[in-house]
Image: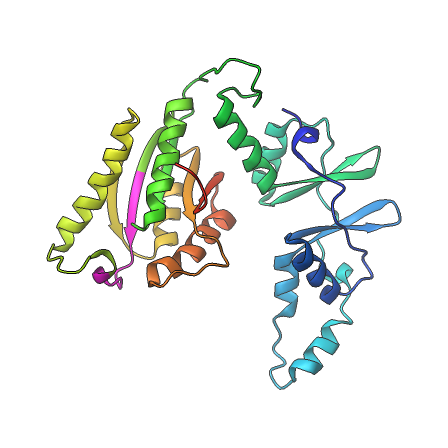
Amino acid sequence: MLVGQWMTKTPVTVGPKESIVQARMIMREHGIRRLPVVEGNSVVGIVTDRDVREAWASDATTLSVHELNYMLDRVPVRDVMTCPAITVTPETSLEAAVALMGEKKIGALPVLSDGQLVGILTETDVFRAFAQVLDYGNVEGRPDLPPRVGPPAGRVLVPVLGTPLSRKAVHEACRLAVQFGVRPKVLLILSESVDMEDFRFPGDTRTLDQIIGGILSEYRNIAESLGVEIETEFRTGEPATVALEEITSNQYDFVVVGRRTPLHLGWSRLELEKVGFAARLLETSPVPVLVVSEAAQV
């Protein structure tokens, strides 16, 4: 599989002299998080929504909103962009590109052909390719080839918070186990300050141990329905911190985590926490993270 098959072609760009206010407007208009910075015919850098948000943070608390916007409108993209941008070509293998993104801890790679920008490869494009591999059962992601199960791919961690979305993450990890022979471990993590009423239905009188046992049993039942054996464990603590400690202290090949649509915030603290939980793992995990969205079909 080559980058050229999966990249987003004719990407939206911004010039280095444009203001960060303009860059932010472009990202919002197109629903994207990264912009290659192009000057003339050359890619001179890349700017992300995080770069813009960090520049937006100001210690000038005495400024009015109007004054702050006026000041930011004069900050050029070149002052906050990453330069030089790390790039690949359309002929680069997708595997090599993914390894490069993991090594450099970046979420996108501008794609150059003969020095000209022809596309951009983002995490979304990579997950789209991965989803097609799962659908067709062969590493080429092609419907005209017979399914092939590859060699065992090691271990996968599934950190969950016990929300309804957690079931989808467990189900997806078990699908990977069936397809590629990975061995899932489901780690249920609850904050020490969590309100157990979030897990109870009206009239529910179960103890904490019974509730936790029931949740883990449900995950094992999901795995059993797909013919997969999983390891389960329960821990308390700050969810992202516990998950990262588990990832770094054991040998996992990748992580599967559920994430709610960022624009939809649930009513409970658990659902609100879910947004930040997945985001932190995406940003800091030393191994690749596969995100399962609430829209995923299981």
Residue 199 visible to the viewer: yes
Give the position of the C terminus as an image quadrant: top left
List x then y, in percent, for residue 93: 65, 26
From this view, report whether residue 78 is shown above or below residue 246.
below
Residue 73: x, y in percent? 76, 71
Quadrant of the image occupied by residue 107: top right
Res 193 → quadrant: bottom left
Seen in the picture, residue 25 relative to 288 is either above or below; the reply is below
**Count of marks placed on residues:** 0
Q: Residue farthest to the top?
A: 146
Residue drawn 61% across the image and 71% down it: 57
275 to the left or right of 167:
right
* Residue that sits furthest to the bottom in the current view: 62
Instruction: Report whether 101 appears left or right of 225.
Output: right
For residue 146: magenta?
Answer: no
Work out whether 285 lies above or below 144.
below
Residue 62 at x, y percent in the picture: 62, 86
Residue 249 visible here = no
Chosen colour scheme = rainbow
Tell me which residue sits at (43%, 61%) in the image: 265
- Front residue of 38/249: it is 38
Q: Nearer the viewer, residue 256 or 76?
A: 256
* Residue 5 placement (x, y as % from top left): 67, 29
Q: In the figure, residue 105 lies in which quadrant? A: top right
| Magenta stretch: includes residue 190 | yes
Residues drawn in magenta: 186-197
Quadrant assignment for the N terminus: top right
